[in-house]
């Protein structure tokens, strides 16, 4: 199914794909052959790391090759093949063995180039190449900067030889001959369902470095059976997975195309990558927005609204026929690991994403709008806070991919996320918007309806854990109003204890608040009255039933209640400030001062 979807997408974007068995590579040197084929010169196209905008890069012939007697590529290859430059040891010396191997590889390269040039008699550029390569091994002065591993392309006049149609056709035939095995095997292709010549091995692996990994980066194969123990009946290669040349080549070309795309690829910050595409060709901004590092809040709100409205008949018809495909990949040595494969109707995928944002949205008291956070930020909120930002690479390994799985499938986040998040909250004494959003997500996807919380203050809630969080926020505000210049706040000293065991901690703080209220009655009577009223109102709801200890889920409700109360206090202060400013007469007549919290 996966290979079928890749080949279907390949048919749709055929104009964007390179020629068959071609891959994007950087060109370091150009062998520029004269139009009469009598001479050539070597042009330097190497650039430093600071000149990446000047890199010469293009699709060139490619196929996976291994072993000691590796065959040549057509026209574009390393300097060892094209120019006969031998490999050098670390001290710069060259062994006789390496020199002989370089000559062997150069001869193999010339033979393949001559085979193409002699078969293209009606093209002047091909005839110039035929004349040049017929004279024997290339004998031109080489700069010292030329290394055996450098990529060398060939030009005649203004034409790249590997871009000529006959060269592309010959290279495709050459790859099929190499990858079809010693004896060509024909049979039923599992991808297209037709009887065709079958591959012995996949011709093109995933490009090195295309998939982030914590281990050594390498090229990766999607299908590979090397040992008899790995295949049914002890059969190796692709005998148990028959794939024809056309489907195998196109599927891997599409895979590398998606891995190179900025729009259809999401690289995880530790390892792995997610690729996505749709069945219909129309671009879908809602999906691209989800995989963006910083999605626009207006786009998210439009997505949520669109999922809550009945679509018009045309949109409904399109939604029924369109589909969303998602492929999550990892890399284990030289093998691709398919971690997740998603094949669902597009409407269901968008509905799941809208539910994801709805479940974690956090009310922002400063802006008066709901804030939404990108996936990577939710994962990083379980990392270490450094005072001004989260420590890079401190997020738990694999958590971002697990949250993505939860979002796309509309499932509960991983069970480990809640204790990890609580651990960091206790250690950092920090409850910010990303952490609050992840807490809301974890609780809103709990099977217990009591855990489902609104994005802002719920004054009607009677949940003891939620009320305890509100109590702690008010007690902290009392201290802040009474002692505005204090260095160590209640949150610094008692937050972790209050979250874990609220009964003992809150009773003590409630008793100690008497001294703060005494000062407020003297210095800020209006603020003291408002805070005391608020504190007694919340305390009356929980009464003497302050819980002794809270579970992880209850601690989450405590933290959200604490944050909601703080945000509501900020909103009230802002509203009071605006009312006060609006009440000032234009003539500047003074008005009575009021104190609010």
Image (spheres, helix red, strand yellow):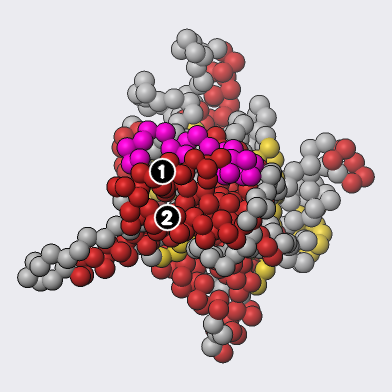
Residue at x 38% of width, y 61% of height: 571
**Mark 2 → mark 1, Cα distance in angstroms:** 11 Å
Residue 516, numbered circle: 1
Q: In what element is the residue under mark 2?
A: helix
Front position in the image: 390 or 510: 510
| Residue 85 is at least partly visible in this image | yes
Is residue 119 something that shows in the picture? no
- In-image side of 226 versus 516 (left or right): right
Residue 551 placement (x, y as % from top left): 70, 47
Magenta segment: 483-507
- Residue at 36% x, 35% y is 486
Q: Is residue 276 left or right of residue 120?
A: right
Q: 149 or 469, which lies in front? A: 469
Q: Is residue 8 magenta?
A: no
Q: Is residue 506 magenta?
A: yes
> Which of pointers 2 and 1 lies earlier in the amino acid sequence?
1
Q: Is the C terminus in the top left, top right, bottom left or bottom right quadrant? A: bottom left
Q: In the figure, 171 relative to 50: above or below?
A: below
């Amino acid at each position: 199914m996966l290979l079928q979807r890749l080949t279907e997408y390949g048919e749709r974007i055929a104009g964007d794909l390179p020629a068959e068995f071609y891959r994007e590579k950087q060109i370091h040197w150009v062998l520029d052959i004269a139009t009469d084929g009598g001479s050539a010169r070597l042009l330097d196209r190497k650039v430093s790391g600071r000149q990446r905008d000047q890199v010469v890069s293009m699709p060139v012939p490619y196929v996976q090759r291994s072993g000691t007697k590796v065959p040549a590529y057509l026209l574009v290859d390393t300097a060892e093949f094209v120019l006969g430059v031998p490999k050098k040891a670390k001290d710069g010396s060259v062994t006789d063995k390496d020199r002989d191997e370089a000559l062997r590889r150069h001869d193999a390269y010339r033979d393949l180039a001559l085979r193409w040039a002699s078969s293209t008699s009606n093209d002047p550029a091909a005839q110039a190449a035929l004349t040049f390569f017929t004279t024997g091994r290339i004998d031109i002065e080489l700069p010292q900067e030329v290394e055996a591993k450098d990529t060398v392309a060939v030009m005649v006049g203004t034409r790249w030889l590997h871009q000529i149609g006959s060269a592309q056709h010959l290279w495709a035939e050459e790859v099929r001959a190499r990858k079809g095995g010693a004896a060509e095997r024909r049979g039923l292709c599992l991808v297209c369902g037709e009887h065709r010549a079958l591959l012995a091995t996949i011709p093109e692996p995933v490009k090195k470095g295309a998939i982030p990994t914590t281990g050594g980066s390498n090229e990766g194969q999607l299908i590979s059976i090397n040992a008899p123990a790995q295949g049914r009946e002890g059969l190796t290669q692709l005998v148990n997975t028959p794939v024809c040349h056309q489907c195998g080549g196109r599927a891997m070309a599409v895979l590398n195309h998606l891995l190179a795309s900025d729009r259809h690829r999401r690289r995880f910050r530790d390892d792995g990558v997610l690729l996505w595409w749709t069945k219909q060709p129309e671009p879908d901004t809602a999906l691209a927005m989800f995989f963006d590092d910083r999605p626009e809040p207006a786009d998210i709100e439009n997505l949520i609204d669109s999922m809550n409205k009945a679509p018009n008949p045309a949109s409904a018809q399109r939604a029924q026929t369109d589909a969303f495909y998602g492929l999550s990949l990892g890399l284990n040595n030289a093998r691709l690991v398919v971690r997740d494969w998603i094949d669902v109707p597009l409407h269901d995928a968008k509905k799941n994403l809208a539910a994801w944002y709805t479940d974690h949205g956090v009310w922002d008291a400063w802006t008066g709008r709901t804030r939404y956070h990108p996936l990577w930020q939710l994962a990083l909120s379980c990392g270490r806070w450094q005072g001004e930002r989260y420590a890079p690479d401190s997020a738990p390994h694999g958590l971002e991919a697990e949250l993505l799985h939860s979002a796309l499938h509309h499932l509960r986040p991983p069970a480990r996320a809640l204790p990890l998040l609580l651990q960091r909250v206790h250690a950092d004494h920090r409850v910010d918007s990303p952490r609050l959003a992840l807490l809301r997500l974890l609780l809103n996807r709990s099977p217990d309806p009591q855990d489902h919380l609104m994005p802002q203050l719920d004054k009607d809630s009677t949940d003891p854990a939620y009320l305890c969080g509100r109590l702690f926020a008010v007690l902290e505000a009392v201290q802040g109003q009474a002692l505005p210049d204090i260095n160590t706040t209640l949150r610094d000293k008692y937050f972790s204890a209050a979250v874990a065991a609220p009964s003992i901690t809150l009773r003590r703080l409630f008793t100690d608040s008497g001294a703060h209220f005494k000062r407020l009655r003297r210095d800020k009577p209006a603020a003291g009255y408002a805070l005391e009223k608020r504190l007694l109102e919340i305390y009356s709801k929980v009464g003497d039933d302050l819980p002794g200890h809270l579970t992880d889920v209850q601690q989450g409700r405590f933290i959200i209640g604490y944050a909601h109360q703080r945000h509501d206090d900020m909103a009230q202060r802002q509203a009071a400030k605006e009312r006060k400013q609006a009440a000032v007469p234009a003539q500047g007549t003074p008005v009575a001062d009021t104190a609010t919290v």
